[in-house]
Image: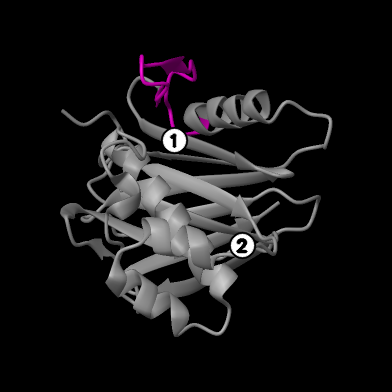
Amino acid sequence: MKKHGQSDLDPAHIWVSPVEDNEDQRSAAHALLVTLARSLGGEGEVRHEESGRPVVDGLAVSLSHARGLVAVAAGRRGPVGVDLESRREFEVDGMARRWFDPVELTWLYQQGDQVDAFLWLWTAKEAVGKALGRGLRGSGLRRVMPFGGATIVPSEPQLAVLRVPLRADAVLAVAVPSSTSEVRLTEHHGAALRSTVTSRTSFPVVVRGN
């Protein structure tokens, strides 16, 4: 039964916020998730399953943090997963050959920025694993991700995964039910407010900043 005001077209929500170097990122992510959950009518209390997966009554939620940033996601349509990685230079070949499927390797080596391509595949795998509630256990890193404009996860057709553009210098992936019609991103960066809409395959991605 749907709660008052709940729509079959409820979007998935992602909030991203910077954190100070000396700030506890995990605590900051939890605080941001509580605020997001309350804004959507959730209870706002974050608990954890034995696996470590965060739980909020009435919502599907996920969180991630990277150097200087935290990201949280919430939705009513079904499981969500979010993963965030800061951009940095590193040697990708060894890790990619160890963990990625040959079809993913072929795509990665065709990209002009292989670090960026690697981070996209990695965050996508993490996001899908979180949405499934398994993380990267059970060969999660070897789960083939869509690329080249596709969003549906080949081995998990009930899920779609997409890259969400950030103004921050980071790569963010979100996994949502494949029936999701919209993803709303809010970046908290000072007082400036920007609202744009960009097309991401079949998903409208509404980008807001404050």
Specify whether residue 182 is in view: no
Kind of residue indicated by mark 1: Ser
Residue at image location 35% in from the left, 50% down from the top: 141
Residue at x 61% of width, y 64% of height = 91
Against 21, residue 160 (above or below) is below
Alpha-carbon span between mark 2 and mark 1: 18 Å
* Quarter occupied by residue 79: top left
Amino acid at pointer 2: Leu
Of the residues under marks 2 and 1, which one precedes in the sequence?
A: 1
Q: Nearer the viewer, residue 34 or 65?
A: 65
Residues shaded magenta:
39-54
| 109 displayed left or right of 166 | left
Q: Nearer the viewer, residue 111 or 90?
A: 90
Residue 66 position within the rendered picture, expressed as x and y whole percent measured from the top left: 64, 44
Q: How is the image coloured?
A: one colour
CB of mark 2 within 8 Å of CB of mark 1?
A: no
Pointer 2 residue:
166
Quarter of the image for residue 89 reads bottom right
- What's the mark number on residue 62? 1
- Seen in the picture, residue 91 relative to 12 is either above or below; the reply is below
Instruction: Describe residue 166's horizontal placement relative to residue 169 as left or right.
Output: left
Indicate left or right for 7 with 171 as reference. left
Image location of residue 190, percent across then percent down? 80, 50
| 151 in magenta | no
Q: Position of residue 58 (x, y in %)?
A: 32, 24
Name the chief secondary structure element in magenta.
loop
Q: Secondary structure at mark 2?
A: loop
